[in-house]
Image: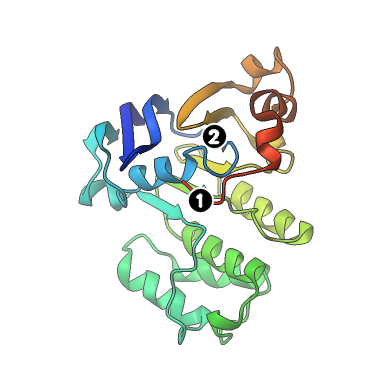
Amino acid sequence: MLEIRNLTRRYMTRTAVDNVTLALEPGKTYALLGPNGSGKTTLMKMIAGLTKPTSGTIAFDGQPIGPRTKAMIAYMPTENYFYNYMSVADAGRYYEDFFQDFDARRFAEAIERMELEPRDKIRQLSSGMSAKLRLALILSRDAKLMMFDEPLNGVDILTRAQVVDEIVRNRASARTMLISTHLVDELDPYIDYAIYMKNGVIALMGSRAELAEQGTLTELYLKIYGEFSGTEANDRV
């Protein structure tokens, strides 16, 4: 169980996440929805222990976010965080050395399904191929909470289908999946709960059944964000 209480993150005069409280249950898939600039990335980085909250608390399985929880949480950022000299296989070995729960066999199977060559240099990968590599690395861990920050962003429609298939393949009864996106339609069939963020606060959240009374996930997205979704902020928070 992930429990977040009164969580706030401020950057100078800007508040990226503002007094957010929520709980994520094991075995559920959550969509964290909203345009760039709505606070999704900042929230996920705080859960991953990469960004320190200004105030509020985060606990996973009853433990405050820290070294112990990092072993149970896998986070896929949007940024390419590898050294230029690394190959696809090098990235796998790096993760195997760093994370005890990394499964090298699972990684080899994942990159084969996603048509990645182990010898290819990461610096030469397209944005779609780089996204698939980051996804394969995260999904090769045995983490209790898996978070994906905009895994469909900047990739073509065929790659999106592969990404969604891999995420769905790795859902498990005791695993929580949190996926941030502003591309609602591709993930709609697989979501248990949706969380809409706007200007750092939760504008709306609920189960699919609860939200269905108000409209589809896409209809609700358009109602909440309107014209803002077409003119997203340049700074990702």
Which residue is at the far front?
A: 13
Q: Is residue 221 above or below residue 50?
A: above
Foreground tag (2 vs 1): 1
Q: Disc 2 marks which residue?
A: 30
Asked which quadrant contains residue 110, the reply is bottom right
Of residues 233 and 38, the one drawn nearer to the viewer in this rendering: 233
Q: Earlier in the sequence, mark 2 or mark 1?
A: 2
Amino acid type indicated by mark 1: Asp
Foreground residue, 38 or 92? Answer: 38
Q: Residue at x 54, y 80 (%)?
A: 122
Q: Amino acid at mark 2?
A: Tyr
**Residue 236 percent coordinates (x, y):** 50, 50
Q: Quadrant of residue 192?
A: top right
Q: Is residue 237 left or right of residue 6?
A: right
Spatial distance from mark 2 to mark 1, Cα to Cα? Answer: 24 Å
Q: Residue 97 in the image: x percent, y percent?
A: 32, 73
Mark 2 burial class by Cα count in 10 Å: few <14, some 14-19, many 20+: many
Circle 1 SS class:
loop
Left or right, 80 with respect to 71, comes to right
- The residue nearer to you, when weighing 233 against 179, is 233
Q: Are marks 2 and 1 in contact (CB under 8 Å)?
A: no
In the rendered image, residue 26, in percent from the top left (x then y), is placed at 44, 33
Quick one: label 1, few (<14), some, or many (20+) residues within 10 Å? Answer: few
Residue at left offset 64%, top offset 73%: 112
Answer with left or right where residue 10 lies relative to residue 16.
left
Please determine whether, in this image, residue 170 is positioned above or below residue 200: below
* Residue at the (72%, 28%) spot, across then down: 222
Q: Which residue is mark 1?
A: 235
Q: Quadrant of the N terminus?
A: top left
